């Protein structure tokens, strides 16, 4: 089964200090039929105004992955971590028994756009952890670059879930292939540009903000179809 969720079908939360598009039930958006996709609980596309932010607040028993699309995002937490994360950086918080953190925009003039992904942990009650890593655009070009995983591959951030998060920048007419397994789910989100997603069910044209939720065994093909420039996407393989 392939379900396409268009950008317009997401829930929009527009406040003076932050604009968010929620792919799943979150905050003031409550839809029991759209609460999660397997272990994926949240996929939020956020844009923070200059000098604004989400001030210190707690989490527990969540795997929270943040990808900075543009601008700079400042992170602080009660584990003592402080960092200014530039575009191309992926941050991982394994909340475990509890972590307090804040995410703010330190810029006086520029917005910051970032994706925030929440996964259920494989095991609850673990010691909280934080990590972050910058992945240059050249490393993401015309490939699926593994940036977070529960299986411990070198170079990727470690998470407490049997999931894998990939980033890609696709030039026009470049193709990527990803074999899907019967008992797995795949979530594809187009950050910018246009992507053709092909499987046994046919070919689907995705624009920026669109997503595909796939649960079937097939050889997936991703093709960049942007008329000018490149496409950027995230692919999440999860139980």
Image (cartoon, rainbow, N blue to C red):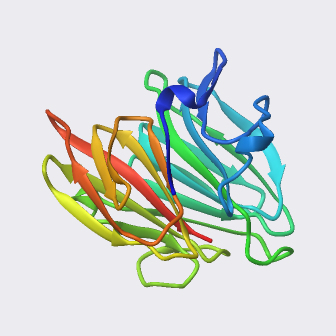
**In the image, is 79 to the left or to the right of 234?**
right
Q: Position of residue 214 (x, y in %)?
A: 50, 58
Residue 190, given in percent of the width and then of the height, sits at 39, 44
Q: Is residue 105 above or below residue 138?
A: above
Q: Position of residue 32 (x, y in %)?
A: 80, 41
Q: Quadrant of the C terminus?
A: bottom right
Q: Quadrant of residue 10?
A: top right
Q: Please report the residue visible at 56 percent of the width from the left and 72 percent of the height from the top.
A: 184
Relative to the observer, which residue lies in front, 150 or 135? Answer: 150
Q: Looking at the picture, how far across and down is residue 101, in whole percent? A: 74, 50
At x 70%, y 52%, the residue is 36
Residue furthest to the top in view is 16
The relative height of residue 71 versus residue 138 in the rendered view (above or below) is: above
Q: Is residue 19 rendered to the left or right of residue 71?
A: right
Q: Residue at the location (52% across, 85% down)?
A: 152
Q: In the image as oriented, which residue stretches furthest toward the front?
A: 201
**Residue 138, quarter of picture:** bottom left
Residue 228 lies in what quarter of the image?
A: top left
Tell me how many marks there are. Answer: 0
Up the image or down, 229 lies above or below 59; here it is above
User: In the picture provided, is 142 more to the left or to the right than 144?
Assistant: left
Position of 12 compared to 223: left or right? Answer: right
């Amino acid at each position: 089964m392939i379900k396409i969720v268009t950008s317009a079908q997401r829930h929009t939360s527009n406040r003076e200090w932050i604009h968010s598009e929620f792919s799943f039930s979150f905050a003031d958006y409550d839809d029991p039929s759209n609460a999660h996709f397997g272990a994926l609980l949240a996929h939020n596309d956020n844009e923070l105004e200059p000098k604004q932010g989400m001030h210190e607040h707690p989490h527990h028993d969540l795997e929270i992955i943040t990808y900075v699309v543009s601008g700079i995002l400042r992170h602080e937490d009660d584990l003592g971590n402080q960092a200014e994360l530039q575009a191309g950086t992926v941050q991982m918080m394994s909340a475990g028994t509890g972590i307090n953190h804040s995410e703010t925009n330190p810029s006086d003039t520029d917005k910051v756009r970032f994706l925030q992904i929440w996964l259920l942990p494989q095991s609850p009650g673990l010691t909280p952890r934080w990590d972050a890593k910058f992945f240059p655009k050249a490393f993401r070009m015309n490939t699926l670059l593994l940036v977070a995983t529960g299986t411990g591959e070198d170079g990727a951030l470690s998470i407490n879930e049997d999931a894998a998060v990939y980033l890609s920048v696709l030039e026009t007419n470049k193709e990527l292939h990803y074999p899907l397994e019967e008992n797995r789910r795949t979530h594809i989100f187009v950050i910018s540009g246009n992507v053709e997603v092909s499987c046994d069910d046919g070919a689907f044209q995705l624009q920026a903000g669109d997503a595909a939720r796939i649960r079937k065994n097939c050889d997936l093909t991703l093709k960049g179809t942007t008329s000018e420039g490149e496409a950027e996407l995230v692919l999440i393989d999860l139980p």
